[in-house]
Image (cartoon, rainbow, N blue to C red):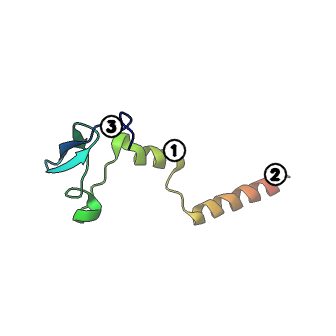
Amino acid sequence: MKEGIHPKYHEVEARCACGATWKTRSTKPELHLEICANCHPFFTGRQKLLDTEGRVERFTKKFGAQTSESRKKAAKAKKDTAAAAR
């Protein structure tokens, strides 16, 4: 290893937002995490759905609750009205 090119390697206590802490080593002097294995939905089996800023509602308002059948019916009706107008 060359001298002076490698970062310092600290022993730190990692802290999650859920309150879990554990000791590890890192090049950063502190580790603050938002999610860990103790609170992640994949590991806990609990699903938390966060709809920040109403994104789902905005999407359904913009595009509507469309299904493939309703799109096909709308396309056919548009085609029929275009043919009748000729």
Q: Which mark is residue 22?
A: none
Q: Between disc 3 and disc 2, whose residue precedes?
A: 3
Q: In which quarter of the image is the N terminus?
A: top left
Q: Quadrant of residue 53?
A: top left
Q: Secondary structure under badge 1? A: helix
> What type is the residue that disc 1 sits on?
Lys
Is residue 39 positioned above or below 29 on the image?
Answer: below
Foreground label between 2 and 1: 1
In the image, taking residue 34 as reference, residue 57 lies left or right, namely right
Residue ID at (36%, 36%): 3
> What type is the residue that disc 2 sits on?
Ala
Which percent across, then down, holds residue 14? 19, 46
Which class describes the residues within 10 Å of circle 3: few (<14), some (14-19), or many (20+)? Answer: few
Real-space Cα separation, disc 3 to disc 1, in angstroms: 50 Å
Residue ID at (29%, 63%): 42
Which percent across, then down, holds residue 78? 71, 55
Q: Are marks 3 and 2 in contact (CB under 8 Å)?
A: no
Q: Residue 7 carries which label?
A: 3
Q: Which mark is residue 62?
A: 1
> What type is the residue that disc 3 sits on?
Pro
Real-space Cα separation, disc 3 to disc 2, in angstroms: 74 Å
Which class describes the residues within 10 Å of circle 1: few (<14), some (14-19), or many (20+)? Answer: few
Q: Return the residue at label 2.
A: 85
Which percent across, then down, holds residue 45? 24, 66
Closer to the camera, 9 or 73? 9
Real-space Cα separation, disc 2 to disc 1, in angstroms: 29 Å
Residue ID at (31%, 54%): 49
Foreground label between 3 and 2: 3
Q: Secondary structure under badge 3? A: loop
In the image, taking residue 71 as reference, residue 48 lies left or right, namely left
Which percent across, then down, holds residue 39? 21, 56
Q: Are marks 2 and 1 in contact (CB under 8 Å)?
A: no
